[in-house]
Amino acid sequence: MPMHSNETSPSRRRERHARQRHRCGLDRAERPVVFVVDDDHLTQDLLRDVAHGCGWEARVFASLSDVRATLARSRPTLIILDDDLPDGSGGDLAREMRHGDIPLLVCTAADLGRVEEIGEWVPVVTKPFRIGEIEAFLAARAPCHEARGPFRGASG
């Protein structure tokens, strides 16, 4: 079971996310979409909750085959991938997609060598991750965010 640290209380995070959504002026239909690809249900739920709290819609997938099928007909604003999935490597999918226009983030508990390898292609956050790392990545890529520079809070 993955562990995730929480540097602020849930009520403070909800208040901060509500302010962000208000500043962006996004209603549900206009929200950016993140694809969360992880086979662990607790991590799926956590990432979905963080995304929703940051004003994003989240679609959850437990396998590469499911997300690949959906990518053939739908484009998210960004994708968060686990590396170790039942039917392959999210890091390898990130390598394939790294030159496209969909931002990618890999969240993994892989060994340091694998983290460094994936980090050559895309940003990596190691598990257990801090909620703030995911929030910062989402905030930097939200449509209302003016500065879209590289994510600086990821390990790698």
Image (spheres, helix red, strand yellow):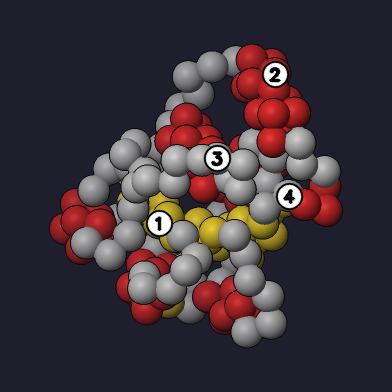
Q: Which residue is mark 1?
A: 106
Q: What is the spatial separation of the Cα atoms under label 3 and label 2, in whole angstroms?
A: 18 Å
Q: Is residue 4 above or below residue 142?
A: above
- Asked whether the residues under the numbered discs 2 and 4 touch, taking CB atoms below 8 Å apart as contact, a structural biologist would say no
Q: What is the spatial separation of the Cα atoms under label 1 and label 4, in whole angstroms?
A: 22 Å
Q: Secondary structure at mark 1?
A: strand
Q: Nearer the N terminus, badge 1 or badge 3?
A: 1
Q: Secondary structure at mark 2?
A: helix
- Asked whether the residues under the numbered discs 4 and 3 touch, taking CB atoms below 8 Å apart as contact, a structural biologist would say no
77 or 46, which lies in front?
77
Residue at figure coordinates x 61%, y 78% from the top left: 71
Residue at figure coordinates x 54%, y 17% from the top left: 8
Q: Which mark is residue 145?
A: 3
Is residue 45 in view?
no
Residue at figure coordinates x 31%, y 39% from the top left: 152
Q: Which residue is mark 2?
A: 15
- Asked whether the residues under the numbered discs 1 and 4 touch, taking CB atoms below 8 Å apart as contact, a structural biologist would say no
Residue 129 horizontal/vertical position (percent): 41, 37
Q: Nearer the N terminus, badge 2 or badge 4?
A: 2
Dot 1 alpha-carbon crowd within 10 angstroms: few under 14, some 14 to 19, many 20 or more: many
